[in-house]
Image (spheres, coloured by chain):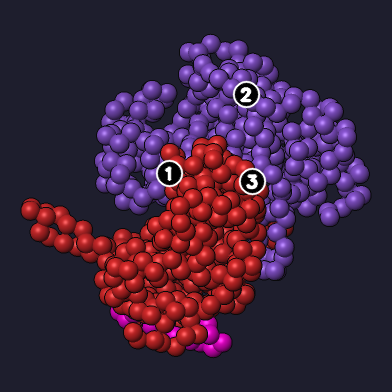
Chain colours: A red, B purple
Amino acid sequence: MKVRDNSYLVEAKDVVKYFPLQFGLLKRKILNIKAVDKVSFGIKSGETLGLVGESGCGKTTIGRCILRLYDLTDGKIYFSGEDTTVLEGERLRKIRRDMQLIFQDPYASLDPRMTVGDIIGEPLLVHNLVKGNEYKEQAKEMMKLVELDSNMSNRYPHEFSGGQRQRIGIARALATRPKFIVCDEPVSALDVSIQAQVIKLLTRLKEELNLTYLFIAHDLSVVRYISDRVAVMYLGKIMEITDSAALYAKPLHPYTQALLSAVPIPNPEVDRQRSRILLPGDVPSPLLPPTGCRFHTRCRLAIPKCKEEEPQLRDVGNEHWVACHLA
Amino acid sequence: MIETLLEVKDLRTYFYIDQGELRAVDGLSYTVKKGEFLALVGESACGKSVSALSIMRLIPYPPGIIVGGEIIFDGKDLLKVREEEMRSIRGNRIAMIFQEPMTSLNPVLTIGRQIAESLELHRGFDRESAVEEAVRLLKLVGIPDSERRVNQYPYQFSGGMQQRIMIAMALSCDPALLIADEPTTSVDVTVQAQLMELINNLRAEFDMAVVLITHNLGVVARHADHVVVMYAGRLMESGPTDAIYSNPRHPYTMGLIASVPRLDLPRDRSLHVIPGLPPDLTQLPRNICPFAPRCEFRDKICIEARPELEQVGEDHYVACFRHNEIKNIGRA
């Protein structure tokens, strides 16, 4: 076992994930959807790393790569210093106990034919952490932890509202007492008033249980609120990564700037005074991403160099990393 | 004095389902002036979409039925006109766009054909000139290379582009009112910014009023002139956008605004949480304030009677028994 610098709980090194697309006669032609293309970052223990970007930028794929739900095309992922990309069988199962996932859709991610107690307890059975019916008691404990009425453990998911279902999903993720949780758009499907409840819950649980989060979302205001550091992705690449305060106070990448300016502030007076950068067009296809900097086709500051040479992610001071020739 | 275009008066749309009578919209009133941008705000199932469908008279019956109220558009009560006349108003004088453009477009017809259809139906274009007009409309909504793309099918466009096509279709008959039901909910923020900017520019260009149905308080702050806040099928507060945000008078409006994380405020600001869940509309007692069960300012009166709308400022109305006391208490 190769053990690395242990300041990071999770570390992604040059992670590449392509999805092959077969077409043509006999399906012999293959193009790769470059979902994630050489992405590196680390998450310290007890930290929340926010991952933002538009649909199709690869943020969900990264989350799934870390959990080994996908096998990488190339690169390495270390969890507690251990290379997870080579793990198999029992060792993989063991490490998975420490990392869990919370899904976006609280309707699709719960089996409608299982009771809530069985749903929350299932991970304990899968990982052989309990004997017999012990899981039922533990599921009730978990329900209390996420502020659900534990007397309702015999009910079915359809009897709960969207916000309550998301709490069930969180309770299930916490059942095996993991160290690390990938939250994949956990509040996007919820109403404003319920969203605030779930954000508060996630923040409280992180403190109480000393958790580490990878928080994937497209809502920049929510990500800023919950994250210690934030990474901005575009077309499979990280464009900028730094601590949350710096990113929002002084975004350096033109894409981050555009993304932030697109978010309207719920206060008309403040919003009127902000400068707005409208990005032209749509995100290009990840099948044939643009040459050089992937953002150059939509960048208002692009120079000829941006088309030819791919900018590397570099530290411009105070752990503020940017992939832009002009920053 | 700007002319009133649409006046919704005491609209009541109920659904009769197995669980009983569901009052999806229960006594909603508001007016839209010519060329005005009005936002209907509220959370899921607060009745905002049902109220829009009621204007179009598109409530599925059974189980839904508009049991009362008036919808005065261009001086005529839409609830009283005959179905044929309604058909000539729908999609012509009043156009509507929806949340999921892909499900609103016909997948087996070219977009040119789909836009041309309403031009032929409502404006008497022939087949050929209708396609020419479709190309012009696509250009107007910012679809590049529209001469070629008019012959493509919906799946060949991105979500943002599909929504632009829906807007082109809505504009084809030069409507006086555009109802947009969560038009940017399924798209990314940068595309959302593009689409909202487009809708707002077109509104000025065509002198068209917009009723935007949304739960995004940021979009409302940026674009709306007037805001109507709904909860559990009822109107809680309505007023000019600046007044609603700088001086909200209903506890629900206050709570909603305070519970959104904001980019312009300190990160460590504690988020306000509205406790509990929206009520089950079939179980909700009729003669109470529907927000009372979740309200931090609740008093005895709130669960004994139903608050009426009271004027609290210019064009600013609130339905709360305690709005004056709350104003003095301030936000906890």
**Which residues, given as a range, are shown in magenta?**
A306-321
Name the residue tied to disc 1.
A111
Write down the chain letter for disc 3.
A
Depicted B71 relative to depicted B229: above or below:
above
**Residue A99 falls in image quadrant:** bottom left
Depicted B71 relative to depicted B52: above or below:
above
Write down the chain letter for disc 1.
A
Mark 3, Cα crowd under 10 Å, few <14 / some 14-19 / many 20+, is few
Q: Are marks 2 and 3 on the same chain?
A: no
Write down the chain letter for disc 2.
B
Q: Is most of the magenta stretch helix, strand or loop?
A: loop
Is residue B6 located in the magenta-colored stretch of the structure? Answer: no
**Contact check, label 2 and label 1, Cβ < 8 Å:** no
Q: Which mark is residue A149?
A: 3
What amino acid is found at the position of numbered circle 3 in the picture?
Asp
Q: Is residue B133 visible?
A: no
Q: Give x and y (percent) for residue A286.
A: 31, 63
Q: Give x and y (percent) for residue B49.
A: 57, 33
Pair 1/3: label in front: 3
What amino acid is found at the position of numbered circle 1 in the picture?
Asp
Q: Viewer-proximal residue, B150 or A289?
A: A289
Q: Are marks 1 and 3 on the same chain?
A: yes
What amino acid is found at the position of numbered circle 2 in the picture?
Leu
Mark 2, Cα crowd under 10 Å, few <14 / some 14-19 / many 20+, is many
Q: For numbered disc 3, what is the local secondary structure?
A: loop
